[in-house]
Amino acid sequence: MWRWVLGIVAAIFLLLIGTCWFGYKKIAGAGNVASTTVAASTQQVWDYFTVPDSIIARQDSTSTLWISRDSSLQVGDSVRMQSRAGGQTSSMTWTLDRMEPPTLLVWSARDDSLGYVVVQRTDSIIGQGDSVRIVSVFESPLMDSLGTGDSVSGMGRFMMRGLGNIATGGMRLAGEMELRALKLRIDGTP
């Protein structure tokens, strides 16, 4: 009798571990880059990335945004994002660190409760004839520093790297959804 019970518990445990591994590979294994191509001019796409009304329109409905400027964004401007999930509220402030109109935007996101930059996002806008390729790259400097520094060793370093991969993978998934919404808004195709 106990063999059956232990066998079932072991099977459930292995199924749980397999599901977690599959989820990790799905999120973290796909990398840190989100991209899409839209039928528009480089300037039109640039405006969608730097005009506050367009930034608000392409965000999901669970987030509330406050933007530091009513006109086109400039280096140093910020977008404060507040999200509610599972009864908890979290907020993050995205600051525009660098821009090269109309091809490059570099953002850093500071978690308001931690005070650290947790994600950096680089958006490249690449003209390709009558369309534009948008490439967004996500990095997690906080997790990267914890995963490579001397403050953490062995298994802790491995776990920090894994958490960094999950963080950038999650941001990539959010970036993909945002780029899909942007593409739908600009050229009407999903």
Image: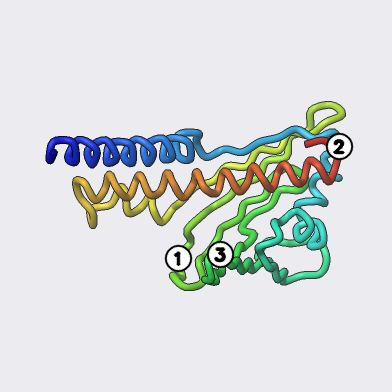
Q: Amino acid at mark 2?
A: Ala
Q: Residue at (12%, 40%) from the top-left corner?
A: 2
* Rendering coords of residue 139 (x, y %): 49, 47
The dot on residue 116 is: 1
Quarter-of-image position of residue 183? top right
**Badge 3 or badge 2: first in the primary sequence:** 2
Quarter-of-image position of residue 165? top left
Residue mark closest to the camera, 3 vs 2 = 3
Residue matched to label 2: 40
Residue matched to label 3: 85
Q: Is residue 66 above or below residue 28?
A: below
Q: Amino acid at mark 3?
A: Ala
Q: In the displayed structure, does residue 49 sit left or right of residue 3?
A: right
The dot on residue 159 is: none
Find numbered disc 3 in the image and state the secondary structure of the residue it sits on.
Answer: strand
Give me the C-alpha separation between circle 3 and circle 2: 34 Å
